[in-house]
Image (cartoon, rainbow, N blue to C red):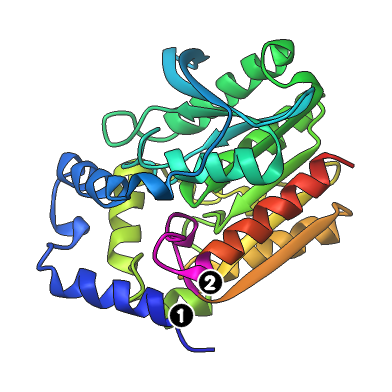
Amino acid sequence: MPVDPYIAALLTMLEESGMPPMYEGTPDAGRAQYLALSAARAPEHVVPVAATEDTTVPGADGELRARVYRPEGEGPFPTVAFFHGGGWVIGDLETHDNTVRSICRGSRVVVVAVDYRLAPEHPFPAAAEDAVAAARWIAAHLGEFGGDDRLAVAGDSAGGNLAAVVAQTLTAEGTPLVGQLLVYPAVDALGDYPSRKENARGYFLEQPTMDWFYGHYAGAWDDAKDPRLSPLHAADLSGLPPAVVVTAEYDPLRDEGEAYGEALRAAGVPVDVRRCDGLIHGFFAMGAVSPAAQAAVDESCARFGELLHR
């Protein structure tokens, strides 16, 4: 189907803004640009939750900023470790505040959002190691968060990559997880997919930006199929927790996300793969401007919640 008209209007506005492409600037400039775009929302568009609390969690090399989101109602609730997107180079707790609020409210879960180290200051595998270390700690302290033994992971884009890595690592270590929400995840670093060509330009996330992200994060790494970088290439996907995989029709990452869903299914993992037609990469943060995006966010969070509350 065509691009959602509200999303199309947003893309036109961004094109006409004169804002330089992120891949032509520095990581610091990209972070500031992304934060400005993400924070531009009216108070009435902030998704309500019962409470939030800033805290820290241990990473692989020191403490990391984190934020705990609690839903309305009486627990105990599942606990979800969330990792933000941004190509491992940009993004933080603030850029993804409303996305996490949506998951907290829509899935009825306590969410612990983790602000892992970014590249190029901390290249691969720093982000993956931080995500795993933080998730291990959260798993050992579930009573302080959701209140029972249900732990899941979630993330969008590069954060979906980290959530998949965490699911694989903790499962292999014997830590049980009850689910994973992977929103347009980056799971195959140098894969060759039709969506990367069809949607390479004009749909918010562009191929040159993806190359810029990868170059900063793992450009010096020899093995693009290292499963900590490309979870799709893990030797064994069996035994992983049930997954909700969300992709967008006009997203360069669409096909690899769906390929990961199919690989999970082939390994015997229950998977709910949903392609959101007419939408683009990043739509989880676009509900305020697009009713179709908001509907897709609501449905995705509801499906994740149904999985965790079985």
Name the one closer to the observer, 30 or 126: 30
Name the residue tied to disc 1: 4
Name the one closer to the observer, 46 or 85: 46
Q: Residues within 10 Å of mark 2 (few under 14, many from 20)?
A: many
Q: Residues within 10 Å of mark 1 (few under 14, many from 20)?
A: some
Name the residue tied to disc 2: 292
Q: Quadrant of residue 274?
A: bottom right
Question: Which numbered dot is residue 87?
Answer: none
For residue 295, above or below residue 229: below
Residue found 50% across the figure and 76% down from its top? 195
* Residue 210 lies in the magenta stretch: no
* Residue 286 lies in the magenta stretch: yes
**Res 73 visible:** yes
Q: Are the residues tagged 2 and 1 within 8 Å (C-beta)? A: yes
**The furthest residue to the left:** 18
Q: Quadrant of residue 188?
A: bottom right
Q: Secondary structure at mark 2?
A: helix
Name the one closer to the observer, 227 or 309: 309
In the rendered image, the quadrant that contains the N terminus is bottom right
**The furthest residue to the front:** 44
Q: Secondary structure at mark 1?
A: loop
Residue found 47% across the figure and 60% down from its top? 287
In the rendered image, the quadrant that contains the C terminus is top right
Q: CA distance from mark 2 to mark 1?
A: 7 Å
Is 222 placed left or right of 164 in the picture? left
Please state the total of marks drawn on the protein image.
2
Q: Amino acid at mark 1?
A: Asp
Residue found 48% across the figure and 88% down from its top? 2
Magenta stretch? Answer: 279-293
**Residue 262 x %, y %:** 75, 65
For residue 58, above or below residue 115: above
Instruction: Return the disc, 2 or 1, that comes first in the chain's sequence.
Output: 1
